[in-house]
């Protein structure tokens, strides 16, 4: 199956089953902005809560913040975003479409590379996204005629208060990181953190991307999960912490089920580094449209705190009680996009049967790790009579009351109900049948192996909890 085909199937499944919808669809949509349906919301919440559990709740050295989306514009002057958060933009003089120049260059290089062989070229061309195709051909015919590249700032502008003038200009934050740096002193004063320590944040970020695309991979409104990890201010400490965070970040994905062979750690070339970084590695994932950035780890030194000290005029130094010295710590930043991670987890989990595993050819199983699966368990009565629905509903309600995301379904054959749950990644299905009336046992069927076991109806909660929530099973 061509990779682009997989992408189309995932987009279609997301819409059909309520993971992701085009935003404002009834009005024709908003460019590269998405809404999340019931299952997508649950999957995203699970991802965020597992990340928070792992990096904040389970660690003594990391605390959380939740800063505002609209911050004082001076924040962006200090961070360098006003001056440097730009992408090179080119416009075609014929069709007036605008593209990111580096994206056009990249896709043209790939085109030249695969052009020698006709069948190879076709496979490659079929695999690229519609956005990438539009970079190669002008909609008015022939080649694009591009203008010189010019810098385009990606921050969304707005105004604070009722008057739209330059003094009231504000920006929607393009990263969550700055909300951490501007609260550095507040956190030092209101908690007992000591270097090395981290501050974590999950929240929305906004970028007016020139060429968004590939579904929820690059959008204009998205969520980030970021940690600023503050360390002693020297390059050796920075390098050591950076290596640790690269490992921890990769492990976060693999512990949650992403196949290691689909990940790659790619250190940035010098000329690629952001204005604040002395060393960055991207963790890339093999998406159907090519190896692309999933998250990144950057050594930001004391760049941000220094800049905020300079622009705000406030002393942001940390007092080290051990040495009696005051300094601006260095920082290492692991950063991850929630929406992008969700796409990677969906792609990695998507499995279409070839008919050799006991399923019919073409049947889809979403092999999501149970920790992030939107529904943990579905409960079915075999038939809609003879007290089976009552027993099934009792089990279902008990699971819900205990905080388990459960689903009750009594329509269609049990086989069809299993398939509906497999397609959305539900790890376990519980069926109440006629035998239950005699032995009080139910059948629990496992999504991945299709193995079935009989369990006492009062032991269902414990059985499910052990298999879908037990953190020790997933974070070794
Ligand atoms: N604070 C550092 C920072 O923001 P970045 O590489 O620009 O670094 C971090 O962004 C992560 O945020 C990316 O690795 C990606 O997962 C996610 N991200 C960035 N831009 C995005 C976009 N337009 N749509 C979806 N996710 C995005």
Image (cartoon, rainbow, N blue to C red):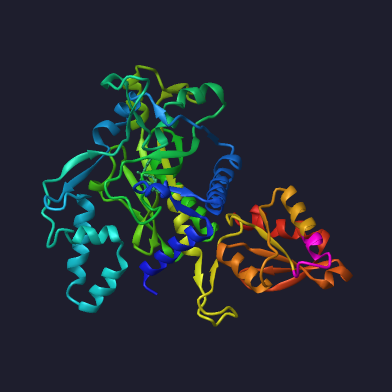
Q: What x and y, as percent, mark residue 127?
A: 31, 68
Residue 74 vertical placement versus 367 (above, below): above
In depth, the one of 141 and 397 nearer the eye is: 141
Residue visible at 55% across and 52% down? 43
Q: What x and y, as percent, mark residue 376?
A: 65, 57
In depth, the one of 388 and 80 nearer the eye is: 388
Ligand 1 lies in quarter: top left
Q: Which residues are magenta?
A: 382-392
Residue visible at 76% across and 56% down? 461
Residue 177 image-quadrant placement:
top left
Question: Quadrant location of the C terminus?
Answer: bottom right
Does 249 sit left or right of 144 as displayed?
right
Residue 315 vertical placement versus 204 (above, below): above
Residue 285 image-quadrant placement:
bottom left
Question: Quadrant location of the N terminus?
Answer: bottom left
Residue visible at 52% across and 56% down? 18
Residue 364 vertical placement versus 238 (above, below): below
Residue projecting furthest to the bottom? 356
Residue projecting furthest to the top? 313
Q: What x and y, as percent, mark residue 447?
A: 63, 68
Asked if residue 391 lies in the magenta stretch, the reply is yes
Q: Is residue 79 visible?
A: yes
In depth, the one of 31 and 258 nearer the eye is: 31
Asked if residue 14 lies in the magenta stretch, the reply is no
Residue projecting furthest to the right? 438
In depth, the one of 123 and 234 nearer the eye is: 123
Q: What x and y, as percent, mark residue 56?
A: 56, 40
């Amino acid at each position: 199956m061509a990779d682009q085909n997989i992408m189309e199937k995932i987009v279609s499944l997301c819409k059909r089953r309520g993971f992701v919808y085009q935003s404002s669809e009834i009005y024709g949509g908003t460019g590269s902005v998405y809404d999340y349906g019931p299952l997508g919301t649950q999957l995203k919440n699970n991802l965020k809560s597992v990340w928070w559990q792992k990096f904040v709740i389970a660690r003594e050295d990391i605390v959380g913040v939740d800063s505002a989306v609209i911050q004082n514009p001076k924040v962006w002057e200090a961070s360098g975003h006003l001056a440097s958060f730009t992408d090179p933009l080119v416009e075609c003089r014929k069709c007036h479409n605008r593209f990111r120049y580096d994206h056009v260059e990249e896709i043209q290089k790939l085109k030249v590379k695969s052009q020698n062989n006709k069948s190879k070229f076709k496979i490659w061309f079929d695999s690229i996204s519609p956005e990438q195709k539009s970079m190669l051909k002008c909609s008015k015919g022939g080649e694009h005629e591009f203008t010189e590249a010019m810098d385009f700032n990606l921050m969304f502008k707005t105004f604070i208060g009722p008057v739209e003038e330059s003094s009231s200009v504000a920006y929607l934050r393009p990263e969550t990181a700055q909300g951490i740096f501007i609260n550095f002193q507040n956190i030092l004063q209101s908690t007992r953190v000591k270097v090395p320590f981290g501050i974590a944040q999950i929240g929305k970020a906004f970028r007016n991307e020139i060429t968004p695309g590939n579904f929820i991979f690059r959008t204009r409104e998205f969520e980030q999960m970021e940690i600023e990890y503050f360390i002693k201010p020297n390059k050796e400490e920075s390098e050591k912490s950076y290596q640790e965070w690269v490992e921890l970040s990769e492990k976060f994905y693999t512990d949650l089920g992403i196949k290691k062979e689909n990940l790659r750690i790619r250190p940035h070339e010098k000329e690629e580094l952001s204005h604040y970084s002395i060393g960055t590695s991207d963790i890339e994932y093999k998406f159907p449209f090519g190896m692309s950035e999933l998250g990144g780890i950057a050594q930001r030194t004391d760049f941000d705190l220094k800049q905020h000290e300079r622009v705000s005029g406030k002393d942001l130094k940390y007092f080290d009680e051990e040495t009696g010295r005051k300094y601006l710590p260095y920082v290492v930043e692991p950063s991850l996009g929630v929406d992008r991670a969700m796409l990677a987890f969906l792609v990695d989990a998507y499995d279409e049967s070839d008919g050799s595993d006991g399923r019919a050819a073409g049947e889809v199983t979403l092999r999501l790790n149970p920790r992030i699966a939107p529904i943990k368990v579905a409960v079915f009565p075999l038939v809609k009579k003879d007290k089976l629905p009552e027993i099934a509903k009792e089990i279902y309600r008990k699971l819900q009351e205990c905080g388990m995301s459960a689903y009750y379904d009594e329509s269609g054959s049990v086989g069809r109900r299993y398939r509906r749950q497999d397609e959305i990644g539900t790890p376990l299905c519980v069926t109440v049948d006629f035998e239950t009336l005699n032995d009080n046992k139910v059948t629990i069927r496992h999504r991945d192996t299709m193995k079935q076991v009989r369990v006492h109806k009062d032991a269902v909660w414990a059985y499910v909890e052990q298999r879908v929530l037990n953190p020790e099973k997933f974070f070794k």
